């Protein structure tokens, strides 16, 4: 059985990590086959195991004045932004219950987003050299994961209505040649709640799982 947790309001990155850690322990003990956490973070830049401090284009002092945190993360990938107007999905899944294949897992996360975009009449795409999902040459979804004892953490972000000013302060994911976009720039009347419901639906479809819906 899988648990679904959808947090309301803005959640700090540290609190999100705490929830993931608790979920990891529950999955490790076999209380759940997996937990899917959906939330919206307060503004934060995170630097993954691939580095990215050199892709920060402003000083920590400027970020502090603007109320933006910058933190190191154990997820894969480079520097990225999480914050208002963006849905973050953290699957804490036991891959021994699904498929013990990290590449399959990452491609499945991307497929969830591709399916959501298709519902809005948008053709998303993968890029062979980069993780994530793109609309033409602009990234709409970042993917960065961590695996421990075949249990996943971190996951994906989907930009719905993100203020571009945040991305102007970094080189997102260290990729200079391509831009960043939001779903709302390509489809009319997109709401966060509707996009969350579609994400949940396609997580169930792509991973062939069912949730015991506990929203808190």
Image (spheres, rainbow, N blue to C red):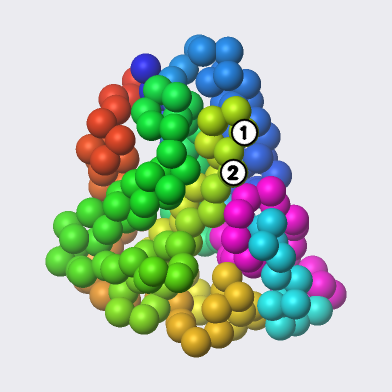
Question: What residue did someone put label 1 on?
Answer: 148
> Residue 158: x, y in percent?
41, 59
Q: Position of residue 54 (x, y in %)?
A: 75, 77
From this view, report whether residue 194 is shown above or below residue 201.
below
| Residue at 74% over, 57% down | 71
Residue 207 lies, in percent from the top left, at 30, 35
The alpha-carbon separation of the residues under discs 2 and 1 comes to: 7 Å
Q: In the displayed image of the protein, which residue is found farthest to the bottom?
A: 177
Q: Secondary structure at mark 2?
A: strand
Residue 107 locus on image (x, y percent): 36, 51
As helix, strand or loop, the secondary structure at mark 1 comes to: strand
User: Would you place residue 54 above or below residue 81 in this image?
Assistant: below
Describe residue 41's horizontal placement relative to residue 32 as left or right.
right
Q: Which residues are magenta?
A: 60-82
Q: Residue at x 64, y 78 (%)?
A: 170
Residue position marked by numbered label 2 in the rendering: 146
């Amino acid at each position: 059985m899988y648990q679904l947790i959808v947090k309301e309001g803005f959640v700090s990155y540290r609190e999100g990590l705490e929830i993931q850690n608790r979920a990891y322990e529950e999955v490790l003990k076999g209380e759940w086959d997996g937990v899917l956490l959906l939330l919206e973070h307060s503004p934060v830049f995170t630097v993954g195991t691939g580095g990215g401090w050199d892709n920060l284009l402003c000083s920590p002092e400027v970020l502090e004045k603007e109320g933006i945190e910058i933190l190191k993360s154990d997820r894969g990938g480079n520097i990225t932004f999480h914050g208002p107007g963006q849905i973050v999905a953290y699957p804490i899944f036991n891959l021994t219950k699904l498929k013990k294949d990290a590449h399959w897992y990452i491609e499945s996360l991307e497929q969830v987003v591709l399916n959501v975009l298709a519902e809005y009449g948008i053709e998303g795409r993968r890029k062979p050299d980069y993780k994530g999902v793109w609309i033409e040459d602009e990234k709409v979804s970042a993917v960065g994961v961590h695996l421990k004892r075949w249990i996943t953490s971190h996951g994906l972000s989907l930009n719905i209505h993100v203020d571009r000013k945040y991305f102007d302060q970094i080189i997102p994911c260290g990729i200079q040649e391509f831009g960043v976009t939001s779903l709302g720039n390509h489809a009319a009347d997109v709401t966060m709640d509707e996009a969350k419901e579609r994400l949940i639906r396609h997580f169930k479809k792509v991973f062939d799982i069912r949730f015991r819906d506990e929203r808190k």
